[in-house]
Amino acid sequence: MRSSVKLGALVAVLALLPLAGVATAAPPVEWETCVGTVTGECATLEVPIDWADPAEGTFQLAIGRLPARDQAKRVGVLFVAPGGPGSSGIDRYTLNPGIPEDSVLRDRFDIVTFDQRGVKRSNEVRCTQALLDQRPADYPETQAEYEQLLDYNRRLGEDCRELTGAVFDHVDTESVVRDIDAIRAALGEEKLSFYGASYGTQVGQQYAELFGDRVRAMTIDSNMDHSITSGAKYIETASADLEGSFLAFADWCARTPDCALRDRNVRKVWTELHAKAEAGQLPVTAEQLRGELMNGMYAPEKQWFPLATRLRELAEGVETPAAPVEPMGETGQNSYQAIWCQDWKWDVRGVGELARYAERAAKVAPYTRISPFWSDVTSCLGWPSEVRNPQHRLDVRDAPKILITKAKYDVATPRVWNYEVARQLRNVALLEYDGIGHGQFGRSTCVREQVETYLVALKTPAPGARCAAVWPKSPEPTTTSDSPETRPTH
């Protein structure tokens, strides 16, 4: 059972930390052993539901730690923020080696993480499973279907609020950032180092914005651009990197002997499959087919060989047995949508506008048409909670130089998003990986070594630094954890 640290009267003080500019003493965290694939330490920290009004109450925030293995050379705390939003940091970084066991980071840092508010052990957002199962298509084709989608989102959000409690309306990223600073204070650290990938980069960006003088070093890997206010631009840029990733996959397959489509024109195979899916002649819809393609682009080294096999089977009419469906409980988690829709406000004026978004995406993605991250826009239309942390350009003043890593094409955090974040942050080092995929630290030895050198020794890569692409040469064993969720996550 995890221990709890109560902030008590310190809650009101912590709420003013950005103004105070000084570290605030807090009761020490009392860690207890928690065991997964690796053995870590877990605890809970009592934090306000609403940082702007601590009197509203508190909840228990779950935190995890892997202590530095070389305490004599310990640098400090490396806070690692998971992606999603909605992924468990404790599952990935405390109970499993999200930071590889052979990394120097394990020797030199206490690896600290959390389940952010609204996620898993930290007052998870829960909703009626039967209602979650009624989710309509994310691609409404008529105004009536558009209105039905808005009504569904509203009803689902109200259901989630009732089942989750007061935390439901306070799961925005700015609140998450303030929780991280409360963790820093409770650990007695004047500064922390930070690593975040995917959605975790937005957490890092906003932490640097609010608490830049408390950052020792920060690597943000595969970046969200939270300044995008146009739904059309959001969908277009995501679609462009899906297209670029697919074309790289097709070219890779043509030169790779073990690719199942080595003897086929992959572009032609895909075009014919997509047309059949649109005509209802495949066991999957066109939307599902694009989702399978996008999921295969996250980690080429694990997913490209199976993706090629899957596309060949579909082309040859081979029926793949459906995976068994595990029975669900009366409620299910819905953390992604709840968090996302408190960070992003989209002004959409009907199904006609969405159709224009799709047309614009198809122009930059003639093969793949449109990114499944289309749902990042449509899932928030009609959602009943306040957008507490709306899109804005970053204003970071006191942080040290930040290291940004990016891929040539990335279906979840496109290249142009990373370039735009670099422009907004200004004081950055940019490390470019010339391959495909999402989350570059685990994709390239070159990237990993440069990130480790920076986080440990504060030595950033030289201007113009690049890491060569690593292309899969032979199939790897896959596990269910290798693939993203059915609904796309960052």
Image: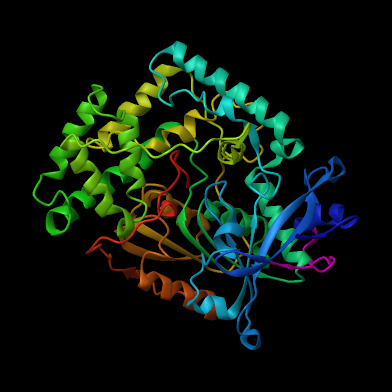
In this orientation, does residue 385 appear? no
Residue 301 lies left or right of residue 194; in this view the side is left
| Coloration mode | rainbow
User: As rendered, which of 244 and 1 lies closer to the eye?
Assistant: 1
Tell me: residue 264, above or below residue 338.
below
Residue 472 lies left or right of residue 430; in this view the side is left
Extreme-right residue of the structure: 9
Q: Position of residue 389 (x, y in %)?
A: 63, 41
Q: Residue at x 22, y 47 (%)?
A: 309
Is residue 20 in the magenta section? yes
Q: Main secondary structure of the magenta part?
A: loop
Q: Residue at x 85, y 57 (%)?
A: 7
Q: Position of residue 429 (x, y in %)?
A: 45, 67
User: As rendered, which of 98 and 481 lies closer to the eye?
Assistant: 481
Q: Residue at x 57, y 26 (%)?
A: 130
Q: Position of residue 141 (x, y in %)?
A: 38, 17
* Residue 167 occupies quadrant: top right
Q: Residue at x 89, y 55 (%)?
A: 8
Residue 131 lies left or right of residue 464; in this view the side is right
Tell me: residue 274, above or below residue 186.
above
Q: Which residues are magenta?
A: 19-33
User: As rendered, which of 28 and 289 lies closer to the eye?
Assistant: 289
Extreme-left residue of the structure: 263
